[in-house]
Amino acid sequence: MALVVLTVLFVALPPDSPAVLAVVFNSARLGSALRPGDRDAWLRERARHPVHLASEVGCLIKTGYGTRHRVREQLGAFAVKGGVLGDEGRDYLVVGDWEAANGTAGGDLGAAVVDAVGLVMRDERVAEFADHVRFGKYRSLSAAVGAGDEVRAGELGAKFGWELDALKFIMGMELSYKRMPHKKWYLILDDDTFVVKESLELLLSHLDPSKPQYVGNAVGDYRARFAHGGSAVIISGEAMRILFNRPDIVREAYVRSLDETWGDRLVATTLQRIGVYIDERYSHYFNGEAPDMARIREDRVCSPIVSFHGLRKPGAMVHAGTTLGRVRKPVLWGQLWELFGQTPLESFENSVMRGGDHVGPGEEEIKVWQGIKKAQDCQRKCKGWCLAWTYDSQRHQCRASPWLIVGPRNSAGEVSGINLSAAKSAFRKCSPVG
């Protein structure tokens, strides 16, 4: 009887009502808990939906005036191996928040940048909001760019570029759908995001683009569970078709973008209105960190990793593209140490510790002990449960985590180690995929 009542409510209520969203969220949690065995086994089955990334996936790259320098390096990183991006305009599109005299702002960035924010401001669907504060901020940035005041424009971009970013998503998606129609999939990337060609191909070749699908690194609470934009967002062609055949919902999304904090969350809440929700079964394939900061957990060492984020330092994007460009199969989380680590994992045999930090920042799930006198005492705290530990000799602090990271090259005053037996035990379980 309870199931019947829930079904009736689910059908009768709006698809974005709190009750429906709670059912969707908790059903996903329950399904994950009850799912037995290897959660990646489905990727070893025959691929029923082969995809050619460069021609069948429309890619939307978002940049801003303050971060525009990243675009050239990102395009260069993808060009190392090729096969992800096709032709500019036909297969990928770059959008930003400023406009040059010729109507685009590519300059020496390697691609033309469409001023998505300017298009939103001039769109008749939001004409009644012409005096909105965000449009005022856009005008300030445009004036500085137009006057050639690089310093002022850079300051403004750093100050409120994140607000203007929220305006790029829906316009960028609409431009992508109109200019790159009939794609099987649409991929949304930040300008500091890199995706692994073989891992992305493997994932998409096992998903049906003729169904409305929304995939990525799920974050947020049940009311607005969304794919983290920096980790890459994937939307099927069918979901895009349904959305852009609902002009009422699209207009509402433009209006809400004027006050939304996070544009990636706006994508989710907009898709919720057409009954499309993020599929959390695939969240563990997406990553919101740079390769040296990605958290390698026991439950995902054998899973393919699709994306990296935060590649902002000069050379970081090209280094990732060059390193991953040598790989011809899907990259697993557990391979990150081999690919990006400074020393072999086996070098931690016999309780070796080295300068650095293999735990990384954060508080959630990290255990911290104060007043620890020496590194060996910290190492003993790790035995039996953690994958990595870091000891700060200046603060006499010990930190341990259920994951390990490659970590930064230098970490003053810190030594770190790996629970090698636990790491090896996890890595031995891996079976080939792809």
Image: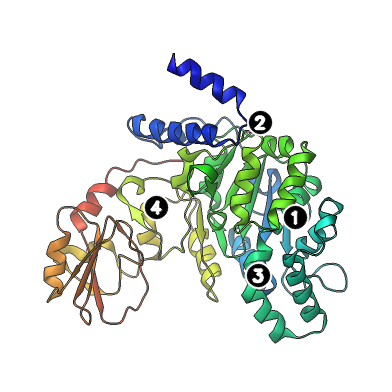
User: Between disc 3 and disc 2, whose residue precedes?
Assistant: 3
| Left or right: where 190 falls relative to 150 | left
* x, y percent for residue 92: 72, 54
Q: Residue at x 51, y 47 (%)?
A: 199
Question: Is residue 52 in view from this perspective?
Answer: no
Q: Kindly state the secondary structure of the residue where label 2 is placed.
A: loop
Q: Residue at x 75, y 49 (%)?
A: 176
* x, y percent for residue 228: 53, 53
Q: Kindly state the secondary structure of the residue where label 4 is placed.
A: helix
Q: Which residue is mark 1?
A: 87
Which label is found at residue 161? 3
- Tell me the amino acid under the disc marked 2: Ser
* x, y percent for residue 376: 12, 71
| Left or right: where 191 falls relative to 225 | right
In three-dimensional space, the C-alpha distance between marks 2 and 1, rounded to whole angstroms, equals: 23 Å
Q: Kindly state the secondary structure of the residue where label 3 is placed.
A: helix
In three-dimensional space, the C-alpha distance between marks 4 and 2, rounded to whole angstroms, equals: 29 Å
Q: Which residue is mark 4?
A: 333
Q: Residue at x 22, y 82 (%)?
A: 394
User: Between disc 4 and disc 1, whose residue precedes?
Assistant: 1
Q: Which quadrant holds residue 212?
A: top right
Instruction: State yes or no: discs 4 and 2 in contact (Cβ < 8 Å).
Output: no
